[in-house]
Amino acid sequence: MSLKAFINYPISSAINKVFFNEMRSRISLPIFLFLVGAGLATTASAELFSRGGGMVYDSDLNVTWLADANYAATQYAESCGAIGTVDGQMTWPEAVRWAENLDVGGYHDWRLPTAPVDDASCDGKPIFTYGSHCMGGEMSHLFYGDIKHGLGGKLGDNIIKTHNANYLLFHNFSAYGVYWTGTNFPPFGQIVFNFHTREGFSNANSKSVHNYAMAVRDGDVAEVDVESDDVESDDVHPEQKRAPNCK
């Protein structure tokens, strides 16, 4: 394993000791001690990693995101309306089915991001995950996280306008920016938590409302060769991606 791969290798705490001992056996003691002193001979700090194929790995939460933040609209444009939705918005049951039916990178276990029922990190909420600066949910963590953990969003600002360099790992965020989570609002079976990327706010909606959806899956994925990656990385409106034979 190269030093570069070692530094950037996301690894679970369960195998930290094995990995640590392996690296110790492969390099000389002076070099190993230098790396320890520099903070490099430990597991990699939690970060976002592009895996190619339209996927981004979050080593802090150990989840993989679709890089396209409005993939349902992209699907609709590229399939001439056969799958997805014209603008990417869906009711909650539609969004759940959409995520469960995804096949990206050979993975079929995609889902909507989760949020805790009661997020103590939220500002100005008496009960439940409601308010600003909620860091417990997967989408809110992505929004508010710093350069190591997320997109650097700020309360009151749209993620499209205020973000850090990690934003370039993703594309196609909606300007409207209300995204479903997969977590029900406990007192009411027809209410589900959502997250607003337009302002960093956590809220809830009826399942019949039409919101956007991002897909995520548990764990890391195999890295895709960038040269063979045909997934567009720029933020292009779905109408501009429409196949030429669509009528």
Image: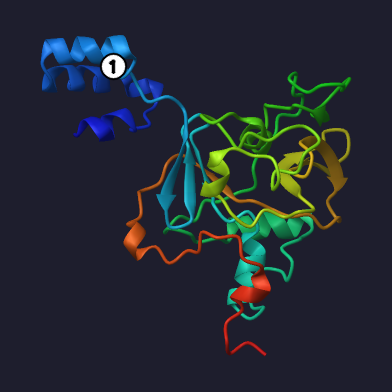
Label total for image: 1
Would residue 120 be seen by someone viewing this image from the given angle?
Answer: yes
Task: Please report the residue visible at 26 percent of the width from the left and 33 percent of the height from the top.
Answer: 4
Image location (x, y in percent) of residue 81? 67, 78
Seen in the image, is 195 located left or right of residue 81?
A: right
Q: Indicate whether 72 appears above or below 37.
A: below
**Is residue 190 in view from this perspective?**
no
Secondary structure type for disc 1: helix
- Quadrant where the C terminus lies? bottom right
Q: Residue at x 48, y 51 (%)?
A: 55
Q: Is residue 185 above or below residue 18?
A: below
Identify the image's colour scheme: rainbow, by chain, secondary structure or one colour.
rainbow
Instruction: Say which residue appears at 75% left-offset and 29% top-offset.
Output: 117
The one nearer the camera, 82 or 153, is 153
In the picture of the structure, the residue carrying the numbered disc 1 is 17
Residue 72 placed where, x, y %? 65, 63
Q: Sort mark 1 into few (<14), some (14-19) or many (20+) by Cα contacts within 10 Å.
A: few
Residue type beneath disc 1: Lys
Closer to us: 219 or 201: 201
Residue 95 percent coordinates (x, y)? 70, 56
Q: Note whether 216 is above or below 47 in the view shown.
A: below
Residue 222, horizontal then vertical, whole percent? 35, 48
Q: Quadrant of the N terminus?
A: top left
Q: Is residue 167 left or right of residue 158?
A: left
